[in-house]
Amino acid sequence: MEERVSLDAPWARLMPLVQAAGDRIVDFLQRLVRVPSLTGDEAAVAALVEAELHTLGIGDTAVDASGNVLGHLAGASRHQTMLHAHLDVVDPSDPGLWTYAPFAGQLAEGHIWGRGSADDKGSVAAQVYALGLLHQAGLIPPGDVLLAAVVGEEIGGLGSRFLSRGRLPDIAIIGEPSSNTLRRGHRGRFEFIVTFHGRSAHASAPHLGCNPNHALARFITALDEAPMAQDSDFGDTTAVPTLLHVDQTSSNVIPAAASVHLDWRNAPGESLQAARDLLDGLIARCLEPGITAEVRLASRKVESYTGMSQTVEHAGTPFWIAADDPRVLQAQRALQRTLGRAVPVDVWTFFTDGGFLYAAGAPCIGFGPGDPAMAHVKDERISVQQLFEATAGYMALALAMGAPQGA
């Protein structure tokens, strides 16, 4: 007989369910890691996720137009909790630098090794099994639970941008590495390209040209000295020059254009327009006769394995939720009861797809297995114990977040 669960439920039941399925969870994550899934090439791993949901008895699944895999577990109400994680990974670079082959999914030293093990297939595996184990145990969440295993997170956020145009969840649990602690937000990210235009000339006759490099150098110095928005919780706004370009390949030619890419991480409350206004003011101070400048957001065309394509600007808003928000406290209580330990609340230093969902109107909270320092590095790996904890944690969040706040 199915059992409706409230916050006075026996949370101690969840971890034993996970431990009983432990070998299957480990095997599933190994199989996920063994499928290379660089951004735009997630078809095979998406099929694997949907097949595993079916194996676990979750028959209500779909693959949307962007390639996201969706799995639905009906609850006692239409209140919806989303479990969100991403399928794509970054390139492992030189496999010879790894202790184990990056797509081997090796189990060693209590960890599963390989590209994507922590970022972000550990969260995918834990969420899939959280949904499946709830179903198999006959535990009915207070509200519907939607699993969203999305594509394109590493470049452009195509899957989550598409998802955010549909029905928004009442709460989204963003599965990214957090060492199984709660995250209540992160800064946003803008990628600006600032270009100074001058006049080209032979380097032996600099007086015949207008060298934009001088204005660019002044701008970078002024940017480094500029006052930025401050936030004691999420970290101050930072603007970091990364890539430099000129329109020449010969070293004896004064370029006609010089550009810098800026990685701009904005604190909550600072808008895109505020960032542009600051840049415009700095640029105006750096101009000289014969030099002009422009600022634009970087953009690129991204394409899914389904054929969907979109040109996206590199602009993502912060997501944040107050530390004393009832939903944060409710999530913390459920996790602590389930895991039997304190679960701290912190913020992420990096950007996630939660920014796109939050901008569309969905409140977000972060929680996921894996050390954030493992993302995008050689010898990426995830603790099996954290994988099990996260699976039980996602089960607890599915049961808790659809219940009335404060229950």
Image: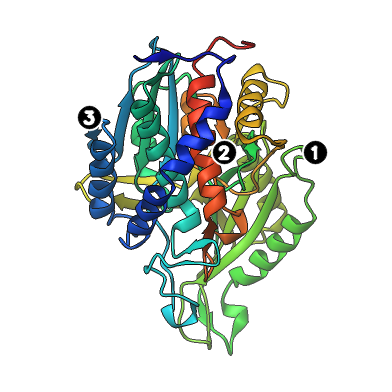
Which picture quadrant has residue 406? top right
Residue occupying image coordinates x 36% and y 15%: 2
Q: Residues within 10 Å of mark 3 (few under 14, many from 20)?
A: some
Which one is earlier in the sequence, the residue at label 1 or at label 2? 1
Judge whether 302 appears above or below 341 on screen.
below
Which residue position holds label 3?
A: 59
Going by the image, does 306 lie left or right of 298?
left
Q: Regarding mark 1 in the picture, which secondary structure is present there?
A: loop
Q: Which mark is residue 79?
A: none
Residue sitting nearer the eye, 252 or 223? 223
Going by the image, does 142 lie left or right of 263?
left
Q: Regarding mark 3 in the picture, which secondary structure is present there?
A: loop
User: What quarter of the picture does the C terminus occupy?
Assistant: top right
Whether tag 1 and tag 2 are in contact, CB under 8 A, the answer is no
Going by the image, does 305 lie left or right of 153?
left
Q: Find the distance from the CA under tag 1 to the CA under tag 3.
A: 45 Å
Which residue position holds label 1?
A: 232
Residue occupying image coordinates x 32% and y 57%: 31
Q: What's the coloring here?
A: rainbow
Q: Of the residues tagged 1 and 3, which is closer to the observer?
A: 3
Which residue position holds label 2?
A: 367
Residue occupying image coordinates x 30% and y 60%: 35
**Residue 162 position in % (x across, y down):** 33, 34
Q: What residue type is labelled 2?
A: Phe
Which picture quadrant has residue 30? bottom left
Going by the image, does 355 lie left or right of 216?
left
Judge whether 300 appears above or below 98 on screen.
above
Q: Regarding mark 2 in the picture, which secondary structure is present there?
A: loop
**Residue 370 position in % (x across, y down):** 56, 52
Whether tag 1 and tag 3 are in contact, CB under 8 A, the answer is no
Q: Which amino acid does label 1 sit on?
A: Ser
Which one is earlier in the sequence, the residue at label 1 or at label 3? 3
